[in-house]
Amino acid sequence: MAEQNTGSPIPTVIADELHIVYRVNGARTGKGSATAALSRIIKRGEERGVRKVHAVRGVSFTAYRGEAIGLIGSNGSGKSTLLRAIAGLLPAERGHVYTDGQPSLLGVNAALMNDLTGERNVILGGLAMGMSREQIKERYQDIVEFSGINEKGDFITLPMRTYSSGMAARLRFSIAAAKDHDVLMIDEALATGDRNFQKRSEARIRELRKEAGTVFLVSHNNKSIRDTCDRVLWLERGELRLDGPTDEVIKEYEKFTGR
């Protein structure tokens, strides 16, 4: 076996003709729906009352260590689904996803322990990411300060249900960003908070890249993508429409959307 060239880029995520299909229970309603459903069952051999949603269609790409990659596209284009597949949360219908290391998915809409305090959620979130209690203790104050949620009071000691959605999202990002990741996937986290927090978040992403990780960022804020990412994947209707340097892909996307 030939010796590996250490100067070559190191792949962290490989998607190979990836297809993700959701199966939704429940027949469609409306006039003639029963007849239409029976016709589909006869023609396609599908289970009664089960509809298929082909969310990701034959997507292929390779991500490398040290890259920050933006994911853009219209609502429902498959961006979040792709991240969930990379994280191992969704099975592939066809094709494969290969990852080097442990991928971590940070989503603004992820479940929170609403009845627990922010302090307890920092501890649980850190443990869930594989941090030791000692590491969490060492980084606890930095996490709270980075989130900025205590700037107008001692919110970290209050239950999460008292937080605004922006406060919760900022704390969640701060917990995830306290650890170096092999692959960190962020779903819309930079869309929350004021510009100061966004700048801190963008700076932290650049630090994570320097620690030899790979960052994926889903955002509808093209400026955040431009400021943070050097490469962009553009998805539409589950298909990879364009993969390339940030400015080139976003320019094409803005022509497509008319923005």
Image (cartoon, grey):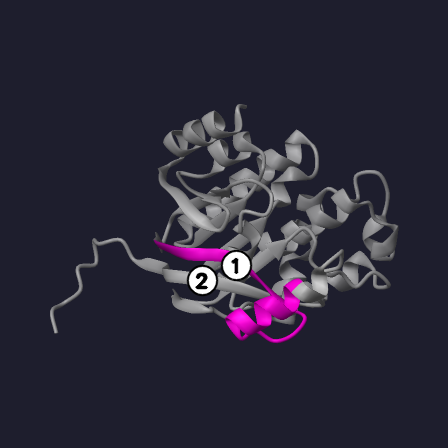
Residue type pointed to by label 2: His
At numbered mark 2, what does the secondary structure look like: helix, strand or loop? strand
40 magenta-colored: yes
Q: Position of residue 98 (x, y in %)?
A: 38, 67
- State left or right for residue 256 relative to residue 169: left
* Most foreground residue, 18 or 35: 35
Q: Position of residue 203 (x, y in %)?
A: 52, 39
* Most foreground residue, 100 or 148: 100
User: What segment carries the magenta color?
Assistant: 36-61
The quadrant in which residue 46 appears is bottom right
Q: Is residue 210 above or below residue 90?
A: above
Please report contact status of discs 2 and 1: CB closer than 8 Å, yes or no: yes
Whichever of labels 2 and 1 marks the residue nearer the N terminus, that label is 2
Q: Residue at x 58, y 67 (%)?
A: 40
* Most foreground residue, 159 or 31: 31
10 Å crowding of disc 2: few (<14), some (14-19), many (20+): many
The C terminus, quarter of image? top right
Residue 82 visible from this viewpoint: yes
The N terminus, quarter of image? bottom left
Q: CA distance from mark 2 to mark 1?
A: 7 Å
Which residue is the site of mark 1? 54
